[in-house]
Image (tube, rainbow, N blue to C red):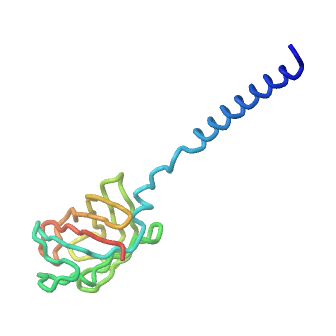
Amino acid sequence: MKPLALFAMRRNYMIGLITILSLYGLMVGCKGKSPQPLSEKIAKVWSPQQVAESSVVVYTKGASTNIRDYSKFSLSLSNTSVASITYQTGLTSTGQWAVNGDTQLILSNLVPIPTGTNGTITFTIISATDSQLVIKRSDTDLKTGALESTYTLTNP
C-alpha cells in the first residue's frame, strides 16, 4: 500500500472512532432530570383555591357566595421542617412537617395545639404539582364540624 493511502485509512478509522465515542458520551451524559422529591415540590407557602367540607364546596377563591371564609387560611411548608398553618379564623399554629411516602402530609408538635387534636394533623395527599396541592384532612375538624375537609391549594 502506498503511504498516503495508509494514512487516509487510519484517518477514516480515527474519525469513526471519535464519532462513536462522542455519540456514546452524549447518550450517557444526557440521562434527563430525575424527578423532584415530593417534599421539595410542596416546600412552599400555599393558599386555598377551593375548600370542600364533607364533599360540599364551601369556599372558592374570589367567589362572592362562599359559605365559609377561608381567605385567611394558609399552609407554609417553605422551611425544611418547620410548618405554619393559619386557620380560617386567623389563628396560627407552628410545628414540624413531614411527608410519609407520597400519600401523607403530617403536621406535628403544633403550638398552640389545634382544637380537638393532640398537636398533630394528618392530611392525605390527593395530588401535588409545582403550582397546586390537593390534600384531604384525615380527621374531623372540630372548628367546622366537617367529617373531612378537602383543600385545593395554590402557590400564590
In the rendered image, residue 120, in percent from the top left (x then y), is placed at 30, 67
| Number of numbered labels in the structure image | 0
Residue ID at (37%, 58%): 99
Compared with 102, 63 (above or below) is: below
Left or right for 14, reference 142: right
Left or right for 12, reference 32: right
Splitting the image into 4 quarters, where does residue 124 fall? bottom left
Splitting the image into 4 quarters, where does residue 47 fall? bottom left
In terms of depth relative to the viewer, which is nearer, 137 or 139?
Answer: 137
Left or right for 52, reference 119: left
Residue ID at (34%, 78%): 93
Compared with 106, 61 (above or below) is: below
In the rendered image, residue 83, in percent from the top left (x then y), is placed at 39, 72
Residue ID at (19%, 72%): 51
Quarter of the picture holding the C terminus: bottom left
Quarter of the picture holding the N terminus: top right
In terms of depth relative to the viewer, which is nearer, 115 or 27?
Answer: 27
In the rendered image, residue 92, in percent from the top left (x then y), is placed at 33, 82
Left or right for 149, reference 154: left
In the rendered image, residue 130, in percent from the top left (x then y), is placed at 38, 64
